[in-house]
Amino acid sequence: MARPHKAHLAYCPIPRKGALMRRLATGQYQATPLGLEARCTVCNEYWPADTEFFHLNQSSTTGLGARCKACDIDCRAEAQAA
Ligand SMILES: [Zn+2]
């Protein structure tokens, strides 16, 4: 019997409470009726704070990188071209 494919699931890492409160206060995060959104430090857009829009960053208190995936890919491409 074939094994089912591993589903790719995006999830929202749970930020440390102090870090979340600080980010909500500074506007880096915003709570919306649809859930938590994080602002990318490069494009300044709010995106859902989950692994579909941000890369995981274990060293961050929020668990997510500061740049959205699209900007992260751009930055990497520019760094390689330089
Ligand atoms: Zn961005």
Image (cartoon, rainbow, N blue to C red):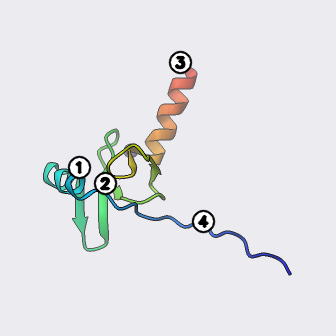
Q: Is residue 46 left or right of residue 25?
A: right
- Foreground: disc 4 or disc 3: 4
Contact (Cβ within 8 Å) of mark 2 with mark 4: no
- The correct choice, above or below, for 41 with respect to 45 in the image is above
Q: Amino acid at mark 3?
A: Ala
Secondary-structure class at tag 3: loop
Q: Position of residue 50 (x, y in %)?
A: 41, 60
Mark 2 highlights which residue? 38
Q: Amino acid at mark 4?
A: His
- The correct choice, above or below, for 82 with respect to 69 in the image is above
Neighbour tally class for label 2: few under 14, some 14-19, many 20 plus, Cα within 10 Å: many
Q: Residue furthest left?
A: 25
Sequence order check, earlier mark of 2 and 3: 2
Q: Position of residue 81 (x, y in %)?
A: 57, 22
Contact (Cβ within 8 Å) of mark 2 with mark 1: yes
Sequence order check, earlier mark of 3 and 1: 1
Sequence order check, earlier mark of 4 and 3: 4
Name which residue lies at 74% across and 76% down. 4
Secondary-structure class at tag 4: loop
Mark 1 highlights which residue? 28
Q: Marks 2/3: CA distance?
A: 29 Å
Q: Which quadrant does ligand 1 occupy?
A: top left
Contact (Cβ within 8 Å) of mark 2 with mark 3: no
Contact (Cβ within 8 Å) of mark 3 with mark 1: no
Sequence order check, earlier mark of 2 and 1: 1
Mark 4 highlights which residue? 8
Q: Marks 4/3: CA distance?
A: 33 Å
Name which residue lies at 40% across and 60% down. 13
Mark 3 highlights which residue? 82
